[in-house]
Image: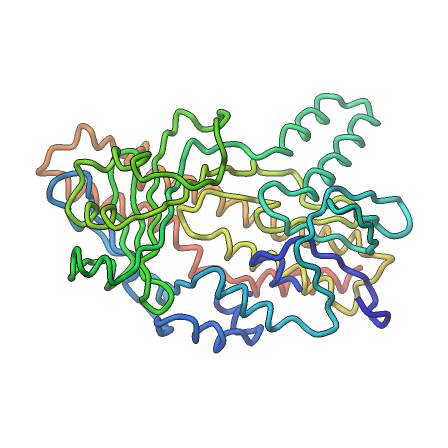
Amino acid sequence: MTSGIRIRVAICGAGIGGLTTAGPWEIIRDLGLEEDLLRTTEIKRVEGPVKSIRYRKSDRAEGLDFYALESQGNLMTFHRADFQKVLLRRLPASYRVHCSKRLRSYSQPLQGPITLLFEDGEKHTCDVLVGADGLKSAVRQGLLGEKAKWALSQNNATEAADITALIEPVWSGECAYRALIPAERLKQRAPNHRAFSYPMQYLGKNGYIMAYPIMKGKFINLAAFKCQPELSGSKFNGAWVCPTDKSEFQGIFRNWEPDVQALLDCVEKPLRWAIHIIKPLPSWVSGRAVILGDAAHAMTPHQGSGAGQAIEDAYILSTILGHPNTNLSNIGSALKIYDRLRRPVAQKVHERSRLNGRYFTFNCEEINFANVPESDLLPKLKLMGQIFTKNWEWVWTTSAKALVDEAKRQLKEL
């Protein structure tokens, strides 16, 4: 940062959260990014009640439409790379961006700057370290390591062990198989496929498929989920992210409806993603080090909320860091405001996403679909739709602005 800046902030990580620190939709609009982002998608922004995702029971020869999620405002889908490019273009010229660098560790004295050690051997210093470095976060490792050392210094070995156990991600028991399908290829196979018209979720026992158009309709983004709840928390044997063959997951969908078969027939070179999460943490702050996004609350993708939560983290944290009342003498107290306000909200979303994964794969506690007769199937499916809609309602009934206002109020009291 330049010498005229009050606090030197180092942001490690250049994903959605990291770049936003340096916006859900109201934040995008406030940051002046709306027009640039809308140019990257064929979808037009719609306000008010809109039917967005369509749900079908598809683990049968003939699929069954049973629910349409009605949201306040339509679902906006973007290719991640397009989103990041828009954010990168908006970074001020005074910000120094270093690409292809990975943080190895940091050291934080009681007084003086934080020292950052990178994998290439370089060292740099900062006043505040923001860890937006994802699932395998080096900042989280250091932050929780500091807390564990403190617990040991207070002769609390049990607390130290509990904190240490939270450092590493854990497997959710789920794998996602992702692929981009050229729209022309799918049109040749199924000219009137539902995924051309609106976001679709094809649900069944222990698996589901999400499909929707991106990149101005040139591709269909597909994610096929294979879920084994009994393996949640166990060790995943193999690479967490790697290319694979569709034969690895095609079997679970073998007897599913024609819409699903058409999608799978068009898949080439899928990527397997073993979904790992971060268990709820007791704090996101240690001294002048702080984490956000996946580094703080990596969650299952069953609400598509990971990036949105990172944006909200970044919006509130950047508001606090840029507030005129925030300075080097009170930065620790200012970061605690962020922790108090944002952490409980994101952790609730984390749990709702987990529950939606259970509903989408018919592993919910409320309804045992194995014992539901055909005559009662549709009413039970609609009931389940109402249940998982409740899990979505926070999206349009809550606002990050309320937390920003509360953060500003608390900053005035520092």
Q: Nearer the viewer, residue 134 or 251?
A: 251
Query: Is residue 268 left or right of 237 when viewed as pictured?
Result: left
In percent of the image, x 29 and y 48: which residue is there?
Answer: 267
User: Residue 66 appears at what percent x and percent y?
Assistant: 19, 49
Query: Is residue 307 left or right of 91 when viewed as pictured?
Result: left
**Quadrant of the image occupied by residue 330:** bottom right
Q: Is residue 315 above or below residue 13?
A: below
Q: Is residue 70 visible?
A: no
Query: Is residue 355 left or right of 110 when viewed as pictured?
Result: left
Residue situated furthest left in the rendering:
375
User: Residue 192 appears at what percent x and percent y?
Assistant: 15, 61
Q: Nearer the viewer, residue 206 or 248?
A: 248
Q: Is residue 339 above or below residue 86?
A: above
Query: Is residue 54 left or right of 64 when viewed as pictured?
Result: right
Image quarter hosting the N terminus: bottom right
In percent of the image, x 35 and y 37: which residue is there?
Answer: 358
Q: Nearer the viewer, residue 379 or 217?
A: 217
User: Residue 394 appears at what percent x and percent y?
Assistant: 44, 55
In percent of the image, x 15 and y 47: which residue is there?
Answer: 258
Image quarter hosting the C terminus: bottom right
Q: Is residue 129 visible?
A: yes
**Quadrant of the image occupied by residue 193:** bottom left
Colour approach in the figure: rainbow
User: Residue 306 appears at what percent x and percent y?
Assistant: 50, 51
Count the marks: 0
In percent of the image, x 55 and y 62: which residue is there?
Answer: 400
**Quadrant of the image occupied by residue 59:** top left
